[in-house]
Image (cartoon, grey):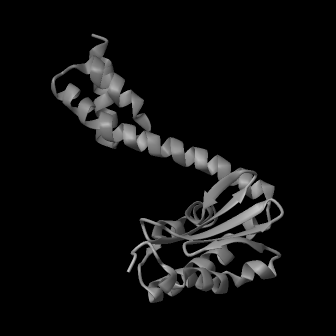
Amino acid sequence: MDISDRSHLGFKEKAREAFAFLNRLGFSEVEASPTLVRYRKDDVEVDVYHGRQSYEIGAGITACGTRYAISEIIRVVDIEIAKQFRYAATNTAEGVTTGLKELSFLMERYGSVALKGDLSFFSTLEKQRKLWSEEYALDVLTEQLRPKADEAFKRRDYSTATDLYSRIRKRLSPVEIKKLSIAEARSKN
């Protein structure tokens, strides 16, 4: 059996069934394959997919030329639910059915405003995406600079410690804030 052939999973048919609510909202199916079903209404597009390599069951909404993953949409609407959200990954017919039902529920519940094409919601999504990106970049920078700053402080290289701690000031612990204060004072001497 060709492992790339997923017709036995019935994704396309199951996605159509699970996402039938989109038809009631005025969406029309515009594309369907064994791993993707796409719907469109005016300028809003919904894609439901079964990841070709990851086997994740996922979805996204595209508006104004930008695609937003269901995880981002949930995160804007309910941060606590977003923290718990994970894409289902499966290679069984039963798993596909379950994953699509769960995803459909989430799309209908948390994506309703996006599905209506509400431009202010997409504007909020775009602002949040930028903020998340900046926060993630700061998290990565913190992971890189924190050990270097701690080491510089231990070596009593207060000028370097001040520079490094200052760059990640928003992520400093109370102890690190104290170290920064000490490093600033001592680097001026």
Quarter in which the C terminus is drawn: top left
Instruction: Give the residue drawn at x 57%, y 62%.
Output: 75
In percent of width and height, residue 48 lies at 61, 71
- Establish if 22 lies above or below 52: below
Nearer to the camera, 3 or 65: 3
Instruction: Give the residue drawn at x 46%, y 46%.
Output: 136
In percent of width and height, residue 45 lies at 73, 64
Q: Is residue 131 left or right of residue 117?
A: left
Quarter in which the N terminus is drawn: bottom left
In percent of width and height, residue 144 lies at 31, 37
In percent of width and height, residue 15 lies at 61, 81
- Establish if 77 lies above or below 174: below
- Establish if 56 lies above or below 11: above
Quarter of the image for residue 37 reads bottom right
Instruction: Give the residue drawn at x 80%, y 59%.
Output: 43
Quarter of the image for residue 159 reads top left
Q: Is residue 33 left or right of residue 26?
A: left
Nearer to the camera, 87 or 156: 87
Residue that lies at the very extreme toward the top in this rendered image: 189
Nearer to the camera, 186 or 35: 35
Q: Is residue 146 left or right of residue 121?
A: left
